[in-house]
Amino acid sequence: MVLTFDEAAEILDEQADRFPRPLFEGLNGGVNLLEEERPDPEFKEGLLYTMGEYCCDSMGRYINLYYGSFAALARQEDWSRETWEKRLYSTLSHELTHHMEGRAGTDALDRRDAEEREHFRKKYRRYRREDS
């Protein structure tokens, strides 16, 4: 099942309301659900997607979640509404953790993400694009 952008946005809004307000302090750009799909260019189409990212740049601090990436995986894996809810929640939670670590001046989650990505690269090296 692929939810519409508006359905996914409604779920995300409801889930954001479940988190304690102090977690959002300093997140001046808020949480944004963007329509785009973000496949990882290093791997063949459909293998790895960026679901969300925490950004801290000249525009401020904000979280982007990529509806298109969620929709692509939902089509591949035939997600239920419950799966959508779980994946949106876990991605938002992950990105909020990046935000909290950024505010605290730590980067443990960044290091863990890099380790997981390296493990993925090794495990799926045969699926990497030839030009990567």
Image (cartoon, helix red, strand yellow):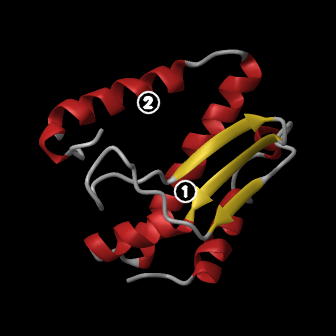
Towards the viewer: 121 or 79: 121
Q: Residue 26: which quarter of the image?
A: top right
Q: Is residue 16 above or below residue 101?
A: below
Q: Which residue is mark 1?
A: 89
**CA separation, marks 2 and 1?**
18 Å
Position above or below: 14 against 96: below
Earlier-in-chain disc, 2 versus 1:
1
Mark 2 residue crowding within 10 angstroms, few (<14) / some (14–19) / many (20+): few
- The answer to which quarter of the image holds residue 10 is bottom right
> x and y percent of residue 96 in the render?
65, 41
Number of residues whose C-alpha sits closer than 10 Å to that of mark 1, classed few (under 14), some (14–19) or many (20 or more)? some
Q: How many marks?
A: 2
Residue type beneath disc 2: Asp
Under mark 1, the amino acid is Tyr
Numbered mark located on residue 11 in the image:
none
- Please give the name of the residue rendered at 33% of the width and 51% of the height, measured from the top-left corner: 48
Judge left or right: residue 71 versus residue 16: left
> For the residue labelled by badge 2, is the local secondary structure a helix, a strand or a loop?
helix
Residue most extreme to the top: 105
Q: Nearer the viewer, residue 117 or 130?
A: 130
Residue at (25%, 34%) from the top-left corner?
121
Picture coordinates of residue 41, whole percent (x, y): 38, 49
> In x, y percent, where is residue 103?
76, 24
The residue beneath circle 2 is: 113
Residue at screen point 17% across, 41% down: 124
In the drawing, does residue 10 fall left or right of residue 42? right
Front-most of residues 7 and 127: 127
